[in-house]
Amino acid sequence: MDFQQLADKAIAGQTLSREECQSIMRSHDQDILALLAATYRVRQHFCGNSVHLHMLINAKSGICPEDCHYCSQSKISSADIERYPLVSQQKLVEGAKQAKEARCLRYCIAISTRGANEREINYIASAVRRIRKEVDIAVCCTVGIISEEKAQRLYDAGVEQLNHNLNTSERYYPTICTTHTYQDRVQTLQAARNTGLKLCSGAIFGQGETEDDVIDVALALRELDPQSIPVNFLLPMEGTPFADHNYLRPYDCLRILCLMRLLNPAQEIRVSAGREVHLRSLQPLALYAANSVFVSGYLTTEGQDYKDTWQMIQDMGFEIQERA
């Protein structure tokens, strides 16, 4: 396969065929640099050499009634994590200030829940209003399954975008969760878009999905057309049903990132949870496909310190973009 031809198609706005997607996923290890070079052409064409940093706060940990098999906060998890109710609004504001100091473009407020209730929505909306007054940073929220009316209140408070990941293909979704459906997630994203909120939606890879599942969710994200696509690699945690799912190799992760960029050429592709664990020494190469990075941790697990991320970006010849 001539990967440069795939780059040409992506730049021209054409959708890769399933066979072309398969050629990416089945490419030989010795061809990874050629694949990255072609992918970088697309990334550079649409996104230049900028990198967006994002930081999140786990504003409510554990105590979740859902049975998401990948999650240490679910009701079926016995993982050794902190569990606590909503943090103070002052802590949310301080977290935004820390994100700004870390040169982040966006600050994400996350809570563990099936869907935020009225009190939680009002509380977060109030905190976002404070953040918008005190800190010059965009705000994203991830609050589970919500209605259009609740999404509207977040938008009115100054939330820029809503995160709600598809997580995997529609076919495979019942294997990773039984307490809500893939369609529940799509409906939440549609509700958010109806209010004017931008969408942040991606997937988690390494959950036992097939190659076709990887391609299906990548194509679904192209059709959804979110502003931002976080690409997560499963962090298997003791006490969760997927604790033994630890099979991804660095090249596997790079192929997935390239597939995401070539199918979603103009989107913000964010290399997210698990990048330090699964990409290991090849982490910097992810920037040839991704133009966004999470720094300093992922909900219940620690991540690369933001200053080390700054250095990685500088060493690769990229620039941090602090404003949209």
Image: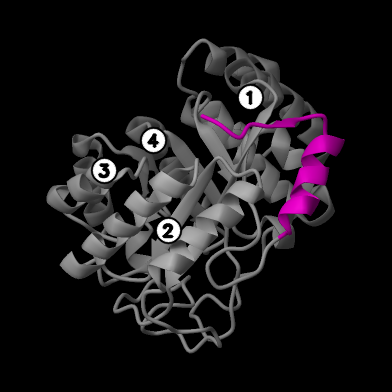
In terms of sequence position, does the residue under pointer 1 or pointer 2 come before the other?
1
Q: Residue at 34% x, 45% y: name it.
A: 159
Mark 3, secondary structure of its residue: helix
Q: Please state the horizontal and vertical placement of residue 71, each as a whole percent of the image.
A: 46, 72
**What segment carries the magenta color?**
304-324
Q: CA distance from mark 2 to mark 4?
A: 18 Å
65 inside magenta stretch: no
> Up-down: is 256 above or below 181?
above
Residue 155: give its label: 3
Question: Which numbered mark, 4 or 3, is in the foreground of this view?
Answer: 3
> Up-down: is 72 above or below 308?
below
In terms of sequence position, does the residue under pointer 1 or pointer 4 come before the other?
1
**Quarter where residue 301 is shown:** bottom right
Determine contact: label 2, label 4, CB under 8 Å. no
| Residue labelled with disc 4 | 226
Q: Residue furthest front?
A: 134
Determine contact: label 1, label 4, CB under 8 Å. no
315 inside magenta stretch: yes
Q: Amino acid at mark 3?
A: Tyr
| Residue labelled with disc 1 | 43
Residue 109: give its label: 2
Mark 4, secondary structure of its residue: loop
In terms of sequence position, does the residue under pointer 1 or pointer 3 come before the other?
1
Left or right of 169 on screen, residue 288: right
Front-most of residues 289 and 197: 197
Q: CA distance from mark 2 to mark 3?
A: 14 Å
Q: Please state the horizontal and vertical placement of residue 213, each as a whole percent of the image.
A: 45, 49
Instruction: Please tell me how crowded label 3 is: few (under 14), some (14-19), or many (20+) other residues with Cα within 10 Å.
Output: many
Residue 272: give its label: none
Left or right of 245 on screen, residue 124: left
Question: Which numbered mark, 2 or 4, is in the foreground of this view?
Answer: 2
Determine contact: label 1, label 3, CB under 8 Å. no
